[in-house]
Amino acid sequence: MNKLGLIIRREYLVRVRKLSFILTTLLTPLGIALFYGIIILMVLYQGDEVLKIAVVDDAGITDSLRTDSVGNIVFYTVNQDINDLKSGLKTSNYDAILTIPSISDPYVSNMAFDYFSEKTPSFDTQLIIEKWLENYVEAHKMQALGIEKNKLEALKTKLSIDPKPIDETSKDTASSISAQVGAGIASMMSIFLFFIITMYGSMVMRGVMEEKMSRIVEVMVSSVRPFELMLGKIIGIGLVGLTQIVIWVVLIGLITLITGIFFGVSMLEMNGGNSNLPNSAIGMANTADMETAQLVLTEIQRQKWGLIIPALILFFLGGYFMYASLFAAVASAVGDDLGESQSLTLPIMLPVILAFYLTIFIVVRSPNSTISVWASLFPLFSPIVMPARMAFNPPIWQVLLSLVLMIATTIFFVWLSGRIYRVGILLYGKKASFKEIWKWTFYRN
Amino acid sequence: MTETSILQLEKVVKRYEKKVALDRVSFSMEKGSIFGLLGPNGAGKTTLIRIITTIIGADEGQIYIEGEPLNGEHPAYIGYMPEERGLYKKMKVGEHLMYLAQLKGMPKLEAKNALIKWFEKFEIQDWWHKRVEELSKGMQQKIQFIATVVHRPKLLILDEPFSGLDPINSNLIKSEIYQLHEQGTSIIFSTHRMEQVEAICEHFVLINQGKNILEGNVKTVKDSFKENIFEIVFEGVLPSAFLERINIIEQQATQIRLKLDNSNESNSMLRFLMDNSVKIVAFREILPTLNEIFIKQVNQSNE
């Protein structure tokens, strides 16, 4: 095995074997899943107490022969006097009494329903009761006004703006949903790249500082060239990052699949439970959601993944090497004090943060604006900005130009960092200033 | 450049921004010798070593290893223990040494066998799976030494090897240095501690402010700096005629240190004392220590 290979191997193994690495890699997706799981459960939580409501229906709009149940609430239409019910509530089977006053005017727009109980109903309970009432009131009004259901449905029109290119030869047409999906993908990609660059970049930095501070570096450079050592470290840690990402993607995929199956079943059950409601509002909302989800899915599938994924990989590699090498150079110039590194890392972090904000606030909203185009070409920003723009079908020449500029800059930065690194790692004591660091790059070997 | 030199430097110059770290340093080191690289702190020793180990390059001048101009292949034949020592704290001892040995170009199996031998020799077999950070400082020094010599370097460079070592480890390393010397390893021993060079080295070069100001065989140099100082341990009373005539440096009840104009005078002086019923217990010539020569030379060159 050659020396670079040996260095990469060590840098990789030493990190991958760490307990902390194994734990973060395995537990992060589980933690995220757990977090969302708890949130979903909290949202879905209906309380475990069954609430039995006696409905005194003076309007006669409910069906006295059936009992409706929505979640944990059961509605019983009763033919009892309201005062009897109230006095006997404690000893009866019911938890609450709901009254429906007679509706004389079908044009009434505000109605109040009395609800008697020991405990004030929760917000969720009120919503369910209102929804339940609304269905019956609506059905009653339709009858009273002589409106047929299909006519009422006919009034509702689903609208959407469908942007079309003027030039018909352009293969790709965009829809409003495609813009949203693009924005979603773009934000995710820039968050992802931001995260990668900062997290693994600082891992490189810590590695270099540790090497310098433990003084092993002088032994190392008596066997290998400093540049090999730096490159080996960057590649090794890059592979650590890739390993972590692959494991995360697989784990998150698995968790999504498992929860998908699990929740898919429970969704169906819920719908089944509601199906005895006339005109189920929840059911309607679900179908609308399903349609949107379907559209989003087709939109995601419509993206040119064959182009986006290779570009994403190239920009990831370029961005990582560019910033990791700068982090390595800075780390080599830091003295023995860890705190000193901050003033030197700030100038590196600045463009990363700027690129991230540019993407989130400008590129996602107007991907073809002048700022977006220039930001996606500027090599310090392009690794984060261009992948985000990829979701909006930028002209191919811009992608290629951005790639070429980024690769050239990356090579330059790796070279420059190598020159700083070889001097920096051998100087002990105080932190170097930027002026000194700049001079190092001109030192003869 | 001769067949017998392991290392030869010709007018090596290294400049930093404003300072000249090495100013036309030349010397040659014989194969198989223990060679002292002397100089006060900041004289340029570390810079010189870094140039020999190819860590940095010289601005001018030539360096030859066994007659070959220094190149990228040579580090494999050099073992370097820097003054600033260090290891990867989180690594296991065995793995760490394997890594360093392989970086020196040793095949895996060969490295492993060599390391096992060293572990047996130092009786530290049970350290193999320990993390470096679990070891004491002294233990780490041993590991560092093994790391320096495991690839059987032709040229061993030790920068202040005894600094921070307790006497036991110090002796251990010293005996290992002698053993390697007997096996034919050429050893450069860099230090500012003269007594160590005097005890260990055959040849040396003295560097001050980037220039070599003195070099040669330890004994020859000491001879050339001798000032005909003698020490006599005696019983009896020294005749006053004798005391008046000679140049006394130091005098005690039964011991006197004196300076003669000429070393040939020693016999006649002794004869004179014996004839005057002074009993001679011991007589020896006092040679200057390297330390004295060093301080004298450094002061001279600084003036």
Image (tube, rainbow, N blue to C red):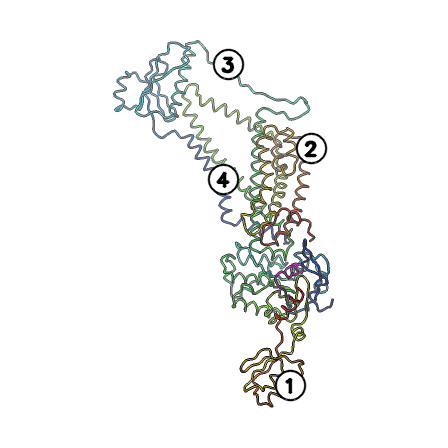
Distance of label 3 from label 1 (alpha carbons): 135 Å
- Same chain assignment for discs 4 and 3: yes
Q: Chain of mark 2?
A: A
- Same chain assignment for discs 2 and 4: yes
Q: Which residue is mark 2?
A: A397
Q: Which residue is mark 4?
A: A29
* Contact, mark 1 vs mark 2 (Cβ under 8 Å): no
- Of the pair B248 and B203, the residue shown nearer to us: B248
Tell me where residue B300 sits by quadrant.
bottom right
- Viewer-side label of 3, 1: 1
Q: Is residue B89 magenta?
A: no
Crowding at mark 1 (Cα within 10 Å: few <14, some 14-19, many 20+) = few
Q: Which residue is mark 1?
A: B267
Q: Amino acid at mark 3?
A: Leu
Q: Is residue B164 above or below residue A7?
A: below
Distance of label 4 from label 3 (alpha carbons): 46 Å
Crowding at mark 3 (Cα within 10 Å: few <14, some 14-19, many 20+) = few
- Same chain assignment for discs 3 and 2: yes
Tag 3 secondary structure: helix
Q: Which residue is mark 3?
A: A155
Tag 1 secondary structure: helix
Q: Chain of mark 1?
A: B
Magenta segment? B37-53
- Viewer-side label of 1, 4: 1
* Contact, mark 2 vs mark 4 (Cβ under 8 Å): no
Q: Amino acid at mark 2?
A: Trp
